[in-house]
Amino acid sequence: MNGNSGRTSDLRPAFRTVGQKAGFAGVLLLLLLSPAVFQKFLPPRESLYMAAPWRLGAYPYIHDQIFSETNDVDIAFMGDSPLWWGIDTPHVQAELSRRLGRPAVVRSLCWTWSGVDAFYFIGKDLLEHRHVRMIVFCDMTGGTSQTAHYQAMHFFRFGDDPQAMQGLNWRGRTSFYASAILGMPRNLLSALRPDLPAIPSKEVGWADIRGVPNPATRLGSLPVRTVETGVYSDYSPTNRPDPASVCVESENVAAFKFAGQPVSNTQAAFARKIGELAREHQVNLVYLHLPFSSEADESVITESADWRQVFHADISLLGIPGTKLLGPLAPEERKKLFCDFQHLNENGQIYFTSVITDRLLQLYEDQARH
C-alpha cells in the first residue's frame, strides 16, 4: 500500500497553474469551434479532393473529372465500391459512341463505404462544374446509420453548403460537425500555403491492389482480379442471357419487389436533396440493381426500398433477375464472377456490363428524345 501510495504521490499534475488550465480549455474550445470560426477562410473545394489518398477511393480521379475536364458527360456512374468494381466503363463508352456516331463521354466516379451523403456532395460538385445527361447509381444505404459517411472529411466542410444540414436530426448534424473538425487542420494548412498541383491521375502509381490497373486508365472503373476462395483465373460464361431479360420497372412492374425496409433520417434527407439536384440540373437518374452472389434462384429483383419514393424523384429502375443472370451457371462458375457476396470481380464486371449495356443505352436514347 505504501509503495503504491508513493508512486501515486510522484505523479505530476496535468496543469500546474490556473493559467495552464485556462490555456488548455481555450485551445480545446477553439478546436471545437474551428469549423464555424474559420469557415470564411477555407481554400477552394478543389483542395479536398486533391488531399484524399487513392486508398480511400478514386478521389484524385474524381478531382480531375470535376475540376479539370469541362466537356459534357453522357453517363456518369456514381456510387460506392459495388458499382466501382461492377461496371466496365470503357465498354459502355465504346458502345455508346458506336450508337451516337460521335465520341461519347462515360465516367465512373466512385468511392468506398456506403452513404447517400457522399453521393450528394460529390454529385453537387460535379453538376456545378459539368453538364451531365444521365447519372447511374446503386443502393448506397446498406449498413449506414444516422451519422456522416466514414470519409466525410474529404468532401464536407461546415459552411460550404448551408442547405446541406436541413432535414437532418441532431445526431446527423453532430456527426457532420465532428467530420468538419477532423478535416479542419488540413483545410487550414491549404489556406495558409498554396497546395502543390494535383498529380495527374494517370501518373499515380496504383499499388494498393496487386495486378489492378489505375482506375484513371479505365475511365474510373476498377477491375479486381480476386475470388473469395481459390486462385483467380480469367473466365467468360458461354451462356449469356437474352438482352430482353434486362428489365426496366416502368415497363415490367412484376419484375421488381420492394421490401419496404426503413431508410435512416440522414440517408433519406440526402436522397431528397439529390432528387432536387437532378431536377435543377435536368439530369436523368437511373437506379441500377447490382447482383449478389446469392440471387441465382431469385426470379424477381428485390430492392430494400422503392427508390423513387426515397429520392422523391422520377427514377428509372434497371436490373436483371438472378435466375436470368446467374441461374444458368453452375455454382462453381458463379464463384468465378465474384470477389465476395456483393462485389463482382473482373470476370463478373465484364459479364454483367455486357448483359445490361444494351438496355441501359436504349434508356439513354429514349430519355434524350424527351
Image (spheres, rainbow, N blue to C red):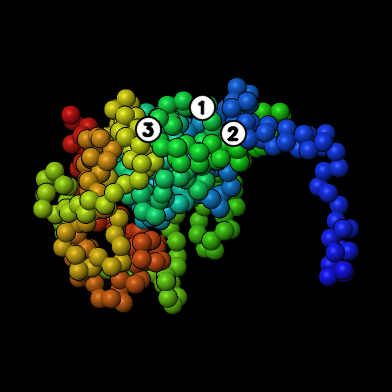
Q: Helix, strand or loop at disc 3?
A: loop
- Residue 315 coordinates in the image, percent (x, y): 23, 39
Figure check: 37 above or below 336: above
| Residue pointed to by mark 3 | 167
Q: Position of residue 350 (x, y in %)?
A: 34, 59
Quadrant of the drawing holding the N terminus:
bottom right
- Residues under labels 1 and 3: Cα distance? 17 Å
* Numbered label attached to residue 160: 1
Sooner in the amino-acid sequence: mark 2 or mark 1? 2
Circles 1 and 3: CB distance less than 8 Å? no
Q: Are marks 2 and 3 in contact (CB under 8 Å)?
A: no
Q: From this viewpoint, which residue is outermost toward the top?
A: 40
* Res 15 visible: yes
Q: In this figure, which residue is indicated by the disc labeled 2?
A: 47
The answer to whether residue 199 is left or right of residue 161 is right
- Side (left or right) of 37 relative to 277: right
Residue drawn at 32 percent across, 34 percent down: 272
Q: Residues within 10 Å of mark 3 (few under 14, many from 20)?
A: some
Nearer-N-terminus badge (1/3): 1
For label 1, the SS is loop
Identity, as a three-letter code, of the amino acid under mark 3: Gly
Image coordinates of residue 160 in percent, x first then y, are 51, 27
Q: Say which amino acid is labelled 2.
A: Ser
Amino acid tagged 1 = Asp
**Secondary structure beneath disc 2?**
helix
Label 2 – label 1 distance at C-alpha: 13 Å
Picture residue at 41% right of the left edge, 49% below the top: 145
- Check disc 1: other Cα within 10 Å, few if <14, some if 14-19, many if 20+: few
- Which one is in front in this view, the residue at disc 2 or the one at disc 3? 3
Question: What residue is at 53 percent from the left and 26 percent from the top?
Answer: 159
- Badge count: 3
Q: Residue furthest front?
A: 1
